[in-house]
Image: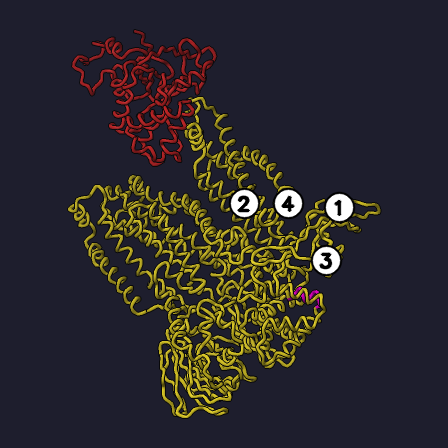
Amino acid sequence: MEMKYSINKLKGLFSIKKTLIYVLFILLLFIYFISASQGHSSNKLRFNFTFYFCFIQSIIAYLFTASELISYFRSGFDKLLYTYNFGIKKIIVHNFLYTLIYQIFITILSFLFLILYDGIINNFETFRILSESNVLLFYLNLLFIIIIILLIHYSCVLYLRTFIGNMLGISIALFFTAIGTILNRSEEINPVILVFTDIFGFSFISKEPLISNFILSRIFIISITVIIFYFALSHYSQNILYSYSYSTRRICKIPYLFYSSHSFFSLIRFHWLYIWQRKTFLFLLIVLTIGLTIDASSSFNDQFGATQFPSSLIISNSFNKYELFPLLLNVLIIFIPLNLFDALRNNKFYRISYATPISNISIVFSIVITFFILFILCLIIASGAYAIAALNRFGIDNLLSFEYILLSFFIEYIIFFFAGCGFILLYLILGRKSLAVVIGVIIYYIALLFVFFGDRYNHNWYLLSYFYIPELFNSDINPYPSIFQLSYFGLFYSYWVYLITALLIIFSFIYPRTEEKNIKNRIRNFKRINYKKKYLYVVFVPLFIVLSSAYLIISFHNKEIKGLKEREQNYEQYTKLYKKYLYSPQPEIINAEFDLDLFPQEKYVLVKGDYWLKNIDSVNIDTLYFTMPLRESANIKFQQIKLNSPHKAIIEDTINHFFAFILDKSLKPNDSVFITYKLRLEEINNAGYRDMHISPLWTLVESRYFVMTIGYGLYREENGGKNFIPKTLQEINYFKERNRLHSNRINPKIKCIISSPINQVIVSDGNLKKKWNIDSRAFYEYNSYPEMDLFNFSVITSSKFKKIYIENNGYKINVFYIPQHEKGAQGILETSNRLINNYTKIYGQLPYKTINIAEAASYRGNGGSSFGNSLVFQEEMFTYDFLDTLHINSAKILLAHEIAHFWFGGKLNTSYLPGASILTEGLVEYSAMEQLKNFYPFNISRKYIEIILKRASNYEDSPLNQAFDDKYALYYKAPASFRRISMEMGNQKFDTLLRNYINISIGKFVSLQDFIYYLQSSTLKSDSVMIDELFLKNIQYYYNIKRAKVIALKNNKVEVNVDFQIIKNIITRKTYESYPINNSELIDITFLKKDKIIHQEELNLNSLNTTLSFNLNEAPDLIVLDYKFKFINKARKNYFELKD
Amino acid sequence: MALENVTLDIKPGICGLLGANGAGKTTLMQILTTILQPNKGGNVLYNGKDINNISKQYRSILGYVPQECGLPDYMKVKNLLLLISQFKEIKYKDAKKQIGELLEMLNLSDKENAYVKELSGGMKQRLSIAQAFLGNPEILILDEPTKGLDIYEQEHIYNFIRQYSNKIVLISSHIIQDIDSTCNSVIIIDKGKVLYSGLIIELIKSFEGKLNGTDFSNANENLSPLRDIYLNIIKSNKNLVL
């Protein structure tokens, strides 16, 4: 009982709000500690900023305390307390003491957690560093802070309200984060993003941060935003409410103009007058703008951590839905509308209508409109923030998709708005604001789960989970819309606003002011409204409802959406019905001709395909089977399918697109048959995915949309949402089967005539043979020479393309770009020329001599893709500065990656067996890493290599030869492993081996087993053991420098004693067993002073288990183990900083 | 406002402190609550002891309603009262019981869990009074407890105070009717001087027949003779000793 009593005392001195803010601040600080402690020496800066962040936090905490004290003094509460034996001194001491106790308590908790965390992750190393370096300093700073507070508290508190203090704290935090970000530009991760997305820095540890920490991160983010914005916005919205409920006198003071008309317009004017009078709201806007701008700016830093761009659009790149949604959800959706609506329900507007003859309806309208204006205002601010950041980064001329960004943002805001309306409805149903918020938030989390699953399977669930908006789902988003189009979208979606308005009006009558329960009074009030306007309302309410409902009904009925479930059912049905034809012998495609007519304005494509099929088997073929796969981005409609030989159709399944024909006369070996088919691609949803997009300004069609395949389409099972090869198929010699099933054992000759409106420039795979115009259409004929896989054939058009090219070393490189992107295009041209030269020298000549690189405005994919002899990149790629040699540029890495695919993936064909993709993605990434040498000095490129190695160390699954499409295996572990082999074996030797392997594998489908066998048979035994460990076993190294000490010797020399730790483990079914270190495993130790190498030597890995002494000419300030990054080190700390 | 030569003897019962704005009422009350200290030579005795020498014991039997009490907005009513109970060193169990009773009496039971900022002006004033009455103090000093309240609120509060006529209750006000209807004795103060200190009945009696046109025997309840007496005393600005 007594304890409870003390808690009450504590409550008295500390508000829960303050406590929560403390906790959150400390949490943030703690997160920074963790994230900062994970990196290498360059993280020191961030670490320091973290420390100052903590410092500021303390200042703010004490300011709160001081502000409360002052508020006691100003209000006279102190006098009251004094009369109860609680003097001023006591009050001050108590306040500060409790603040300190709180801080210490929370800090201890944080550190306990840190110890735990650190213990699990880093074997207490980080904690040791922390305790040695900064913790004492932290408490010294606390002392300093108290002194500062004594000096400044009075002046601050006199003007600052507590909640402004909160906002100030957040602004300062953002400021420091921004500075940290700017100074750490080359860091692998953006600290702002880190805080909002990956608060515990799990992206380093876990393979799927979104999966493992999804809920945790969201809870954190939503809590922080709720706390911050709740206080700010409730304060703000209450001000508005009180302006109505308590300020009738004030209204009278406002000039007659503002209330004389008695219309809702006067209310809106009043409303806004009041809002602008409120500095709090302005302050909030400023903070929001600064915060968003900082974040947007920092997000534009080169994120070289991955070869892939985060996304095509800057907007979704920098502040995507995961980050922004919770923030804006709270601001726009929960608090403003709910507070306003609450006021309405609880009759807080009573007095104004009591004092003046303004009706309820006017108030409702004014709220809705004010809310909508607020919403638009926030939209403008946020978009403006991005605009500033984006323009600053790219310049107006180089940012064609700017409007598109606005549009994307606009759409996202619309969704917020709908969600806000949903909350209001919830409130209406539940009758309690708090319950509505709780349930709303739960629903939100469920929605996020949909996002999560949506990302894995079907992206569109994300939209569906909020509100079903068919136009968004099937949106024909023009990448370059006009202002009119933008307005159209805005107006189009505001049907919802009308609906909500109408509902609000109705509910305001159902739940009337308490003083006027009498229906007659309500009617009387209604009669008071201005005669003309009254009927306007009467007409508008049903009109809104009818329009919205009609719109909804029409949308629902007209746009049938096939979800993941339906698609899977479809696959199942297809497999069930037709898999029996899997082993039926089928002819091969010898020649293929396509006529593609693109109609971007009308949004459809007409396709005519002609195949010459030849029986190259030794048996007669009686039945022919054809499949046209179902695709997600368009509806493929069969118009005709015809054979030139007499036949009988036995299956014509237009749902599953499967056809079977019995030939009257069977196809003998070496006999040919001709088939022709016509398709219409329609209902193209332009979702921005990699395979299909059609709009007047930009079109991309991949061959998957118009190439019909022969036989049973096995790929359907592959792509059945699961992304792995069915077990049954692993047992058969699958790559041979694939060859036959995909009809490309022989690469056919392809001729493709593409027509489009006359203003379009068409780029395709193969070589441009000729072009001509007929009427208003342009025709381009492309031939594949040499022959290429049908599925590598793509078509791209854009009316805005300009072309630059370079001829060098027998190659012609064309870059097709949107005119504003000339600088980027030049950079791409020059860089790709260098890359192709380098690769040709290492891996040999390519079969084709023309390479086309084209821009695709909002092409998502992985930022770019490599096709037969063409590359497609998103717009962002063309806005990078390719001349920058000081910062690792993700664009360059991506270019190096995609160009390398011409060799690994193009020239070297891999099977679909487990591990085979490592020979494409792994080798490509390795090649890109190696190419960094040619573009950057080693001290810059090693930062990128370090990231790849760090991520590689997180791969803990089955050995690489059993990995399927694991991102960490393909993009990190595999290239890091190839790099190790290359370093051990000698770079040149490894490259020669690769070149020879490409040459001996032409015309084959290779597997990882083949390659390992090839490598092992061509190398020394020690290398062979290493290869075995890298690919067939899962070995992990843990090594670090525990401590180091410098002892001064005579003659100005020094002795450095270094204490190492080394563990080598093998992972077998998630158990770790120690594994012997080979005597041949050498590791370098490097001593640096002011970033310059003063000594470097090679050590046997085995020798690291002891303390070693090194005699040096001068004292180093940094010791790095494995400076060249040869090993994949799980301990992730290969350096030790020495202090003076 | 400085007080000069003030000599008072306050006995148990409800005593009104009457004076114009700036007469020195609040100063006197702050001296009585030990917030202010009298000048050299001046002292306040309680049971014969100087309150500044026994301030801790003295304050523990004190209940005070300051004129403008800024109760912390962010606290809940119940928590605020619990907090003050703790300063008054009341046991938790007793405090809880007393709080319940006081809130009931002051018509605030339904606001037990409301935040102070959510209360209306009248409610805040009632809460301010509730905190003063916590712990059943011997001395209650109420500095304009009904300031800014409407007539119903005022009546409610005075009704509540009337129940404590066995304690030393000092109420300051400049509204004569309130004092007349609630208090049995009165201190009239003006410009730092005490003009009268004693029972109201005696004061009225002493003026009987002295004021023109006043018939006290038929005095209307709403028209207190005290008003005229008060004005008369103030006008003469003489210490009235009966």
The residues tagged by marks 2 and 4 sit, at their Cα atoms, a distance apart of: 16 Å
| Colour of chain B in the image | red
Q: Which mark is residue B186?
A: none
Magenta stretch containing residue A980, yes or no?
yes
Q: What element carries label 2?
A: helix
Q: Which comes before the other along the chain, label 1 or label 4?
A: 4
Q: Residue under circle 2?
A: A29
Judging by the rendered image, the residue that carries numbered circle 4 is A129
Q: In this view, does A149 lie above or below A845?
A: above
Instruction: Identify the amino acid type marked 3.
Output: Asp
Q: Tell me which segment is drawn in magenta.
A: A978-986
Earlier sequence position, callout 4 versus callout 3: 4
**Dot 2 falls on which chain?**
A
Determine the residue positioned at 40% across, 61% down: A462
Classify mark 4: residues with Cα within 10 Å, few (<14), some (14-19) or many (20+): some
Of the two numbered discs 2 and 4 in the rendering, the one whose residue sits closer to the viewer: 4
Q: In screen coordinates, is A1036 left or right of A373? A: right
Q: Which chain carries label 3?
A: A
Of the image marks 2 and 3, the number of the one nearer the N terminus: 2
Q: Nearer the viewer, residue A797 or A592?
A: A592
Residue drawn at (22%, 49%), measured in percent from left and top? A510
- Establish whether labels 2 and 3 are both on one chain: yes
Q: Are marks 4 and 3 in contact (CB under 8 Å)?
A: no
Badge 4 element: helix
Question: Pointer 1: what residue?
Answer: A1046
Residue lying at 58% horizontally and 47% vertically, measured from the top left: A118
Q: Do labels 1 and 2 share a chain?
A: yes
Q: Which of marks 1 and 3 is nearer the N terminus?
A: 1
| Label 4 chain ID | A
Which residue sits at x=31%, y=21%?
B173
